[in-house]
Image (cartoon, rainbow, N blue to C red):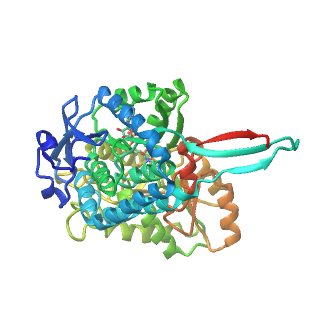
């Protein structure tokens, strides 16, 4: 393994990365343990708070991708045969290193993603936890042995690594979405090719260099940064050596990749978009509901698949809830993520901001009332004001689409049945939140909501020890928990007659 910043990558390093965030983030491709240039040149990494380029990273071509598949395939037999304890100990060292460097990783994420430093700090620690969790799970790959009903033989089932895995991650949680996939893949004995989003390549490369330092052998983790995700991924999915695709991103791209993976019948795990409802019943503790709403809506500035997208509030408490939420949203300090006291940084890019602005504009034209915000501030950077919309009409576009920004639309309901019907009226099913002090109601409603995860009197559900994932068009499979490890294994059944 070549150390980041060494002579081999000098030709592609265009900025002193140590001045970026106090971390030596490499800017090359990582293929077979070598840092290299991309055959397609370089691509710029933009700081969303200033709209300036921070640096450039290598731009991989489909040929680079096939090289990475070759490196991962070559490294697979030895890694799969490495004792689980040893794989776990390497992941444990990666956890320790991630924790030690969490401040630098957090600052790097702020620079390329825009999020506020406090969000980035919490993500840096959360992402490290996936390495700790899967360091512990590596030694818990189980199987089973049963007697066939006929009594004639034994049914033995073992789990084996699924094989070379392509991991595709979004820009919104650049560290956590990578470690949530790399951790279980490596624990299971798979080798990987990570393709991060073009907006946030530096964090992925920094994580890869930490894994190398922790002792991951050459070729086990490969990283391709690219401006041409489509052709590069298509080339990898057409290669029969690739046996797994683990994707986190939009439902639209997920559908496309499922079609491509069908050609080679490649095993897929899909963590896709969300449209989370947040239900507040008239028996809820309203202050707790507002605290939860602030987390569910504003964690990561609203750029989260788990972000509360639609607030359904009982008509008896809606005025009070709206007033309290508005006061909290209006008090948020908007600014560059690295500035002291910033609560909300910029959105990741100009397209994201335009989408948020257009959803708000249409909702207000349709009759929604703006309680605070409702516009982008007049300054450089992709900022948008924290916004609360009240009396949003049913059928408004903002209730059907992922907002992915700091906007809270409120809709009033009159009965529990109506709330459940409204909440389930979406193609998505990632997470739902509900607030009520009646435990019976909480559990009844939780069972009726069509979502893979439910936050009951709680505005956050993410936890490395919990099975994260969606139903309906929010995804297939689970990440985190033991389930996350199983996704990177195949079951082999051995019929034994002894
Ligand atoms: P996106 O779908 O545009 O991109 C995700 C990844 O796919 C990126 O790496 C991108 O480069 C790549 N990609 C884009 N087009 C591709 C193509 N044609 N072929 C192959 N790869 C392609 O999503 P995004 O804007 O980066 O992220 C936001 C989305 O991710 C939201 O919908 C959000 O809900 C979702 N998300 C889901 C989860 C989850 O766990 N369910 C977590 C985080 C984000």
Q: Quadrant of the C terminus?
A: top right
The answer to whether residue 146 of the structure is visible from this angle is yes
Left or right, 206 with respect to 123, comes to left
Q: Residue at x 11, y 52 (%)?
A: 16
Image: 211 above or below 10: below
Front-lying residue, 133 or 464: 133
Residue that sits furthest to the right in the current view: 150
Give how far across and how far down residue 75 sits, in percent: 40, 39
Image: 279 above or below 52: below
> How many tags in the picture?
0
Give how far across and how far down residue 253 sits, in percent: 44, 35
The answer to whether residue 248 of the structure is visible from this angle is no
Left or right, 470 with respect to 64, comes to right
Which quadrant of the view contains residue 223?
top left
Left or right, 277 with respect to 295, comes to right
Give how far across and how far down residue 417 sits, in percent: 68, 56
Q: Residue at x 44, y 43 (%)?
A: 78
Q: Quadrant of ligand 1?
A: top left
Front-lying residue, 32 or 465: 32
Image: 292 above or below 180: below
Which quadrant of the view contains residue 437?
bottom right
Image: 387 above or below 365: below
Give how far across and how far down residue 195 sits, in percent: 35, 40
Which quadrant of the view contains residue 334?
bottom left
Residue that sits furthest to the front in the current view: 498
């Amino acid at each position: 393994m070549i150390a980041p910043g060494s002579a081999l990558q000098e030709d592609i390093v265009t900025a002193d990365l140590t001045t970026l965030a106090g971390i030596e983030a490499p800017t090359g491709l990582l293929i077979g343990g070598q840092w290299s240039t991309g055959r397609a040149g370089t691509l710029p990494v933009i700081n969303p708070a200033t709209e300036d380029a921070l640096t450039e990273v290598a731009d991989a071509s489909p040929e680079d991708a096939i090289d990475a598949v070759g490196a991962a395939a070559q490294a697979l037999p030895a890694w799969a045969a490495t004792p689980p304890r040893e794989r776990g100990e390497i992941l444990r060292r990666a956890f320790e290193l991630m924790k030690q460097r969490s401040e630098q990783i957090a600052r790097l994420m702020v620079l390329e993603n825009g999020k506020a430093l406090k969000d980035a700090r919490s993500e840096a620690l959360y992402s490290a936890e996936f390495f700790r969790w899967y360091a512990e799970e590596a030694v818990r790959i189980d199987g089973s042995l049963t007697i066939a009903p006929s009594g004639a033989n034994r049914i033995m089932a073992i789990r084996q690594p699924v094989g070379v895995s392509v991991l595709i991650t979004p820009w919104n949680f650049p560290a956590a979405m990578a470690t949530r996939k790399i951790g279980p893949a490596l624990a299971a004995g798979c080798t990987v090719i990570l393709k991060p989003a073009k907006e946030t390549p530096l964090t992925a490369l920094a994580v890869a260099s930490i894994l190398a330092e922790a002792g991951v052998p050459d070729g086990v983790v490969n990283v391709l940064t690219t401006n041409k995700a489509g052709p590069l991924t298509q080339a990898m999915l057409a290669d029969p050596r690739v046996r797994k695709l683990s994707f986190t991103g939009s439902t639209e791209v997920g559908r496309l990749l499922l079609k491509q993976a069908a050609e080679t019948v490649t095993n897929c795990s899909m963590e896709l978009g969300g449209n989370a409802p947040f239900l507040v019943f008239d028996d809820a503790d309203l202050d707790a509901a507002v605290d939860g709403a602030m987390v569910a809506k504003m964690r990561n500035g609203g750029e989260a698949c788990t972000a509360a997208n639609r607030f359904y509030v009982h008509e008896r408490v809606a005025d009070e809830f709206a007033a309290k939420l508005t006061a909290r949203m209006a008090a948020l300090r908007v600014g560059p993520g690295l500035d002291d006291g910033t609560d909300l940084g910029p959105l990741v890019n100009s397209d994201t901001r335009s989408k948020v602005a257009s959803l708000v504009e249409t909702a207000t034209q349709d009759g929604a009332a703006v309680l605070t915000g409702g516009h982008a501030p007049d300054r450089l950077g992709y900022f948008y004001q924290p916004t609360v919309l009240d009396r949003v009409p049913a059928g408004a576009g903002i209730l059907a689409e992922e907002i992915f920004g700091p906007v809270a639309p409120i809709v009033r309901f009159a009965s529990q049945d109506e709330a459940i019907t409204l909440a389930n009226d979406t193609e998505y099913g990632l997470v739902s939140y509900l607030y009520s002090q009646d435990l019976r109601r909480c559990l009844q409603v939780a069972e009726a909501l069509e979502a893979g995860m439910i936050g009951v009197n709680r505005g956050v559900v993410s936890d490395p020890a919990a099975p994260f994932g969606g139903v309906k068009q929010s995804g297939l499979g689970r990440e985190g928990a033991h389930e996350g490890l199983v996704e990177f294994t195949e079951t082999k059944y051995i019929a034994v007659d002894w």
